[in-house]
Image: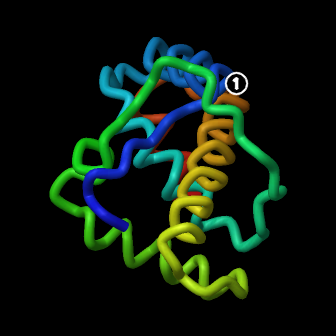
Amino acid sequence: MPYEITIRLSQAAKDQLAWLKRHTGLTQWNELCRWALALSLRDPSTPLVRDISTDSNVEIAWKTFAGPHGDVYLALLKQRCAMDGAEPTETAVSKTLMVHLHRGIGYLAGRQDLRSIQHLIAITTE
């Protein structure tokens, strides 16, 4: 996956991230998205395959999303592709990123007990 990729979010994910920003104290989209991706990737079930409408105005460059750990995130995504029975092509890795990112955002936003960064840390270590 080239580092020039742009991650685009759905309007629903944008709204959920706005809620999460208010409740966790994290102020950057990319920070929350990293938590969301990690949370989804640790779930062994396959996300429901669906087309994601990237209808919001939130765009995150891969370098911004991944920060200095781009190689780690890329390796995790490729590994997940392989675990799900897909060849880790650029297209498959991009799709895996999108479905897991959106699922993870949904997981986080669905937690009504998520009221601080401490709660975020606690639920990701459960």
| Residue found at the very far left of the displayed protein | 68
Residue at label 1?
Answer: 112
> Which of the 4 image quadrants contains residue 95?
bottom right
The image quadrant where one finds the C terminus is: bottom right
Residue at image point 38% right, 43% down: 6
**Residue 117: x and y, percent?**
40, 31
Residue placed most toward the observer, 123 or 48: 48
**Residue 49: x and y, percent?**
81, 57
Q: Is residue 76 above or below residue 15?
A: below
**Residue 74: x and y, percent?**
37, 70
115 left or right, relative to 73: right
> Which of the 4 image quadrants contains residue 75?
bottom left
The amino acid pointed to by label 1 is Gln
Residue at image point 55% right, 67% down: 91
For disc 1, the neighbor class at 10 Å (few under 14, some 14 to 19, many from 20) is few
Residue at image point 57% right, 48% down: 101
Classify mark 1: helix, strand or loop: loop
